[in-house]
Amino acid sequence: AIVFGLFMTGFLLWIKSIIVKNAYLGTIIGIVGSIIIGYGFYLRYRGPYSAGFMTATALVILIYIGMNFFRYKKQEVYDEGDE
């Protein structure tokens, strides 16, 4: 669980750096990457505790990606208006 948590933290930091540059691309990569990682976890570990763990992780990831998307999407709109 610790290694998975560190891996997901690195993944989310990488996604945030992409969202800062391009909100739509970062969001798409984040969602698709999360689905792939979740499916890989499901293939290896099955059971009620693993399903609960992945559900909680998915909620955290979606909230994090959504918050960053809306935050940096607004900044892109303001940056385009300044030019």
Image: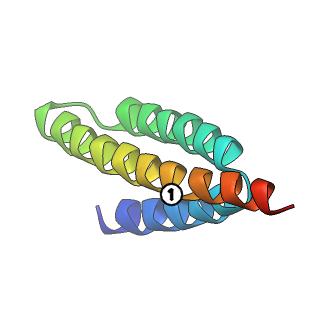
Instruction: Name the residue at the right extreme.
Output: 83
Within 10 Å of disc 1 (Cα), the crowding (few <14, some 14-19, many 20+) is some
Give the residue drawn at x 50%, y 57%.
Answer: 71
Q: Secondary structure at mark 1?
A: helix
From the image, tell me which residue sits under label 1: 71
**Relative to residue 37, is residue 56 drawn left or right?**
left
Q: Position of residue 27 (x, y in %)?
A: 58, 43
Quarter of the rendering occupied by the C terminus: bottom right
Residue name at image x 74 percent, y 61 percent? 79
Going 39% across and 39% down the picture, which residue do you hit? 41
**For this rendering, which residue is in front, 50 or 82?**
82
Residue shown at 79% from the left, 63% from the top: 82
Classify 83 as above or below 32: below
Residue 20, given in percent of the width and then of the height, sits at 65, 62
Location of residue 9 (image quadrant) = bottom left
Q: Tell me where residue 76 appears, x and y as whole percent.
A: 69, 55
Counting labels gives 1
Amino acid beneath label 1: Arg
